[in-house]
Image (tube, grey):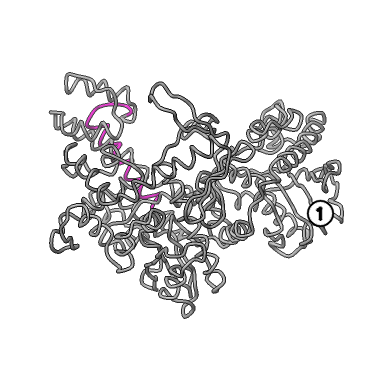
Amino acid sequence: MKTLSVDLETFSEIDIKKAGLYRYAENSEILLFAYAFDDEPVRVIDIAQGEEVPLDVLVALHDKNVQKTAYNAAFEIHVINHWLEEQGFTPHSLDPAQWHCTMIQGWTLGLPGGLDKIGKVLGIAEDKQKMATGKRLIQYFSKPCKPTAANGMRLRNKPGHAPEKWALFKEYCGQDVEAERAIRQRMQDFMPNDTERRLWSLDQEINDNGVLVDWDLVKEAILIDERFKAEIMAKAKALTGLANPNSNAQVLKWFTEQEGWTPETLDKTARAELQETVKSPKTKLLLQYKDLLGKTSVKKYIAMQEARCRDGRLHGMLQFYGASRTGRWAGRIVQLQNLPRNSMGDLADARELVNAGDYDCLTMLYNSPPDVLSQLIRTAFIAPPGNRFIVADFSAIEARVIAWLAGEKWRMEAFAAGKDIYCASASAMFGVPVVKHGVNGELRQKGKIAELACGYGGGVGALKAFGADKMGLSDEDMDAIVKKWRRASPHIVWLWQELEDGVRRAIRTRMEIKYRHGITFQIKKKILFIRLPSQRSIAYANPRIEREAAFDRDSITYDGTIAGAGGWGKEYTWGGKITENIVQAVARDCLGAAMLRLKAAGYKIVMHIHDEVVLEMPHGQGSLDEACAIMGEPIDWAPGLILTADGYETDETANYYRKD
C-alpha cells in the first residue's frame, strides 16, 4: 500500500496542554504542511505564505488505498479536518481507519513518548531527530508573543518578521517527517494487529462523540468555590493576624508561637496527624482552615471550561494505549480515570443548590462545600434532551481474570453462582459462611481489603495502602490476613511464580516459552513480548537479569519511563507485578471486545472509565439489560472466563452521570 507521511506546524492562541487537542484544532491555522510519499524526498508546503497543498496529496488524504502516517496522528487528523472544512470539504472527512500512528506503535513496544525520545532510544541518526532549535522555533512562530515596543506591539510572529528563522522552521518541519519515517521503518516488524487498529479507530470515534456538559453547574461551582475560599481566607487572617495564611513560612512561625515547637511540614497528611496532637484550639481551627483552603475541588471544572468546544461538548478526554505497560486507556483534560466518587445520599438536592448558585443554603446545609463540589464533578456530564445515559460496568473483572488465569476453581465456581467475591474470599480465608449484612458479615470487609491488596503479591504494606490500619487492624492482624488469603488461593500464588519463571526463562534462553491460555514469553530484537490470550502482546524494552546486591538476588529489569520522574531508565519487575500487568491487560482487552460489540449493536459510546462504559442513547433505543448482556457475552479467546456487568440508566429527573 502506498504511504503518505505527514507533519504539520500550526499556530493557535490556545494552549493545547490546557485545552486539549479538539479545542486547539478548532482554533488553529496550518503554517507548514510537510509530507512524503513512500521513500520520496520530503516536501514542505508553506501555507502561511500562500502555497497550496498539491491535488495528489488532497486526493491521497481521502484515498482508502493510501496509508497515512504521522507521529501522534490524532493531531494531524483533527487539525487537517478543520482546515479541510474551511476549504469546503465535508466536516470530519478524514477516516482514522486509514491512518497509522507511530507514537501509539512505539507505546505498544514499551518505548517512550516524544519523537526525539523514541528516536534516541532506537538509535536514529542525529540529523533525523528534532533539531535542537525546534522548541525555540515553535515558541516563536506557533504561539502568541508578548507585545513590546521592540516588536511593534505585535501579538504573533509571522514569516516576514524573521525570514532566516522561518527558513529554519521549514527545515525543522521536514526533519520531523524524516524522523517519523525512520522510526516507523525501524518498527515495521511489529505492526498492530487488526483488532488493535479497529480499537484505535473506535477510540477516535468515542473522542469525536464527546460528552455534553452542564455549563451552568460548572460556572456556579467555580463561583461558589471562589467565594467560600475567600471567606475561609478572611477567617484565617482574622484568627492568625497573618498577611497570607497560605504561606507555609508564615504559618510555621505562627504555629511555633502557639505550640512551642515546629512541625517539619504542614502537608495534608501532617495536618491530619497534627489535629490529634496540637493543644491550642486556635491551632486546631487553623489546621481546619488549611484543609479547606487546600482542597482542589474545582480544578476539573476549570479544566472543563478550558477545553469547551464549539458544540458545548468536551472531546478528546481519552488517550488510546496511554498506559503503555498494559495498553489501558489514560485520561486527558479532566482525567476521567480519577474522578472523585459521590457518596452523598442527597446528591440531586446538592446539585440543584449549586446549579441555582444558592451559596447561603449550601454553606448552611453542608460543613464542607468543597467536598460537595468535588462529589458533583461527575454530574457535570449530562445527556442532551431526548437522550439518556446507559452506564454499564464489568463486575469485579480483575478478580475474575486472575481466577481464570490461575485456575482457582473455588473462585470460578463463586462467580458462576453469582456470589459476592468479598464474602466468598472471607469464607475461604476463615472457614465459615460469610453473608453480606448477614451471618459473619463483619468478615466481609476483611475479605474485601484482602482481595484489593493481596492479588498481586501484596503484603502488610499493601493492606495499609488500602486503609487496613485505619480499620484498627494491627500489623499482626494484617500479616494473618495475608497468610490466610494466600492459603485460600494457592493457584494464584503459584501464578505469580509461574509467570516470573516464564519471563526469566525467556530472557535466559532467548526461546519462546509457552504458558496456558495462549500466553507466551519471547524476546525479539531486544524486546520482551508477553503475548496475551487475545493475541495482543505487551512489551518490555531491553529486558535483562541483573544481580542486585541490595536485594541479594537476580532481578528482572528492563528500560522504561520511570514513574513520577518521567525520564527513561532502569525499571524492576517481579512475579506479582508481571501478574498485575497481564491481568489488567486482559481486562483491557475484554473492555475492548465489549466496546466493539456495543458499537456493532448501535450503541453510542461517549466515555469509558476503567471497566465502565457510558452510552448516550435516545429514549426508546437500547436498554441497560441489553448493554449488560452484550458486555457479558463469552469471548472467543477466553473460553471459561465468566463476565457479568451491571449499571443504571438515567432519566429526566436525574439525567447526569454519577457513580451508582
Q: What is the crowding at mark 1: few (fewer than 14 residues within 10 Å), some, or many (at least 20)? A: few
Q: Helix, strand, or loop for circle 1?
A: strand
Find disc 1 in the rendering and name its residue.
2
Instruction: Indicate the amino acid at tag 1.
Output: Lys
**Residue 413 location, quadrant:** bottom left
Q: Which residue is painted at 62% across and 37% down in the image?
A: 114
- Asked if residue 322 shows in the view, the reply is no
Q: Which stretch did the figure color magenta? A: 221-244
Q: Is residue 380 left or right of residue 306?
A: left
Q: Is residue 508 above or below residue 78?
A: above
Q: Residue furthest bottom?
A: 620
Q: Nearer the viewer, residue 15 or 413?
A: 413
Q: Which residue is painted at 68% across and 44% down in the image?
A: 71
Q: Position of residue 438 (x, y in %)?
A: 14, 64
Q: Position of residue 7 (x, y in %)?
A: 74, 44
Q: Nearer the viewer, residue 508 or 642?
A: 508
The stretch drawn in magenta includes residue 243: yes
Q: Is residue 622 left or right of residue 265?
A: right
Q: Nearer the viewer, residue 460 or 69?
A: 460
Q: Position of residue 216 (x, y in %)?
A: 43, 59
Q: Is residue 180 above or below residue 617?
A: above
Q: Which residue is painted at 41% across and 58% down in the image?
A: 217
Q: Position of residue 290 (x, y in %)?
A: 28, 35
